[in-house]
Image: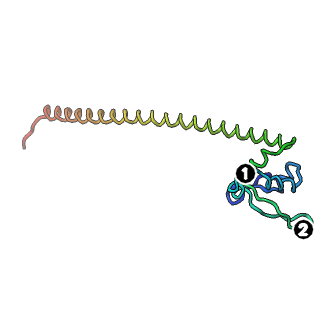
Amino acid sequence: MNLVNIEKGQLKTTSKIIADVFGKTHRHVLRAIRDMDCPNDFRESNYGLSSYTSPQNKKIACFDITRDGFSFLCMGFTGKKAAEWKVKYLNAFNEMESGLLSFDKRMTEISLERDELKQVGIKWSALGREIKSRKDIHIARSNQLLDDVQLKLEY
């Protein structure tokens, strides 16, 4: 069973899934959500009233829960499964942080490399202009020399 699913581009789970995964009774999870000490706007945006159908074909109330709501709720859980989840959560967060720091370092390196290449390009452009100028002078001098040494034949 997936603890978290993607729904309409957002990570979500349900109170029923949380109860099943953490080995808690669903009514205790529902009570934990209702008794949470959090601002109402947080509750409204992270816990949506929903329902599921039981194996006995009964419609039972539950909550659709966002990632932030899930984290807020589950950080308050105790017990072996909760502790295992917290360690996995922290490890994943640390791995993500390490990846972001690595990404930031690599982006800085690429940015510095780009700046260096830009400076080399400026130098090459200046060198190219100097070569073209000297080549034009050389061609002009060569042409003048040819003109000076050629015999002038008249018809």
Is 122 or 68 nearer to us in this picture?
68
User: Which mark is nearer the camera, 1 or 2?
Assistant: 1
Residue in view at x 85 percent, y 50 percent: 21
Q: Is residue 14 above or below residue 53?
A: above
Residue located 17% across and 31% down the image: 145
62 vs 46, left or right, is: right
- Neighbour tally class for label 1: few under 14, some 14-19, many 20 plus, Cα within 10 Å: few
Vertical relation: 45 (above or below) 118: below
Question: How far from the left and from the top, in percent, is residue 126?
Answer: 33, 34
Bin the neighbour count of mark 2 within 10 Å (Cα to Cα): few under 14, some 14-19, many 20 and up. few
Q: Which residue is located at x 16 percent, y 34 percent?
A: 144
Which mark is drawn over residue 48?
none
> Which colour scheme appears in the figure?
rainbow
**Element on which disc 1 rests:** loop
Q: Position of residue 107 (x, y in %)?
A: 55, 38
The answer to whether 134 is drawn above or below residue 50 in the figure is above
Q: Is 122 or 144 nearer to us in this picture? A: 122
- Residue reaching furthest to the left: 154
Q: From the top left corner, tell me how far across and down residue 133 is, in percent.
A: 26, 35
- Residue hosting label 1: 38
* Spot occupied by residue 54 in the image (x, y as percentages of width and height): 89, 64
Q: What residue is pinned by disc 2?
A: 57
Residue at disc 2, secondary structure: loop
Q: Which of the image's four quarters has the C terminus?
A: top left
The amino acid type, in three-letter code, at marker 1 is Cys
- The amino acid at mark 2 is Asn
Q: Mark 1 touching mark 2, by CB under 8 A?
A: no
